[in-house]
Amino acid sequence: MARALWRYTRVAALTSLDRLDEAKKEQADFEKRFADLPVDSMMGNNHGSNLLKIASHVLKGEIAAKTGQYDEAITQLRAAAVIEDTLVYDEPPGWIQPTRHTLGAVLLKAGKPAEAEVVYQEELVRNPENGWSLMGLRDSLERQDKIAEAEKIGARWKRAWANADVTPPSTCYCQRLE
């Protein structure tokens, strides 16, 4: 499990750095580690295979988005979110980075702000007042010219990030928005 997740983080980092040839090689190594995972493997309260299924979909989605294949990226990230929703409660969560943050960022990059709005609202139901989701919701509303709503969400976002020392460019560093 640890080796597979180590590969996952390498693929995510290389993808974010636009080093896609290296990322795809690491992705193949990740998939091999995933295939070798013992059936009874657990991480906290969750089956390791469920966590690695999420990871696999996220990696496929991030790479597809980086290459402009937004429909494929969205399909993969939605599949990851469905699996994430089935995880058993655990602290810390079995999957720490909500997949909807990545999905929403990809939807915005793909020019689908109305769909991104729904995704961020869904995530806010699961994680109320989450600063990342508030940022994405604000951005999706702005891109739909829902200025009054965006300003209200923006105020909540500012409260959520009041003590932060950085302001991220997007809800996922893997998808920087212009």
Image (cartoon, rainbow, N blue to C red):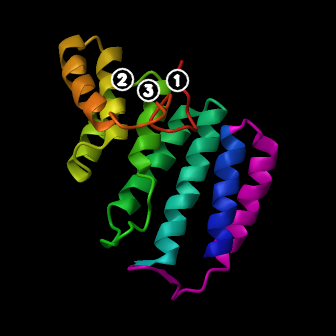
**Res. 68 image quadrant:** top right
Magenta-highlighted residues: 17-45
Q: Position of residue 154 (x, y in %)?
A: 27, 24
The residue located at (43%, 50%) in the rendering is 99
Q: CA distance from mark 2 to mark 1?
A: 10 Å
Q: Position of residue 63 (x, y in %)?
A: 64, 42
The residue singled out by tag 3 in the image is: 108
Element marked by disc 2 = helix
Identified by mark 3, the residue type is Leu
Q: Position of residue 25 (x, y in %)?
A: 80, 54
Identified by mark 1, the residue type is Leu
Q: Tell me, yes or no, whether the two marked residues, 2 and 1, touch with CB atoms within 8 Å.
A: yes
Q: Tell me, yes or no, whether the two marked residues, 3 and 1, touch with CB atoms within 8 Å.
A: yes
Q: CA distance from mark 3 to mark 1?
A: 8 Å
Q: Tell me, yes or no, whether the two marked residues, 3 and 2, touch with CB atoms within 8 Å.
A: yes
- Say whether disc 3 or disc 2 marks the residue closer to the N-terminus: 3
Question: Which mark is nearer the camera, 3 or 1?
Answer: 1
The residue singled out by tag 1 in the image is: 177
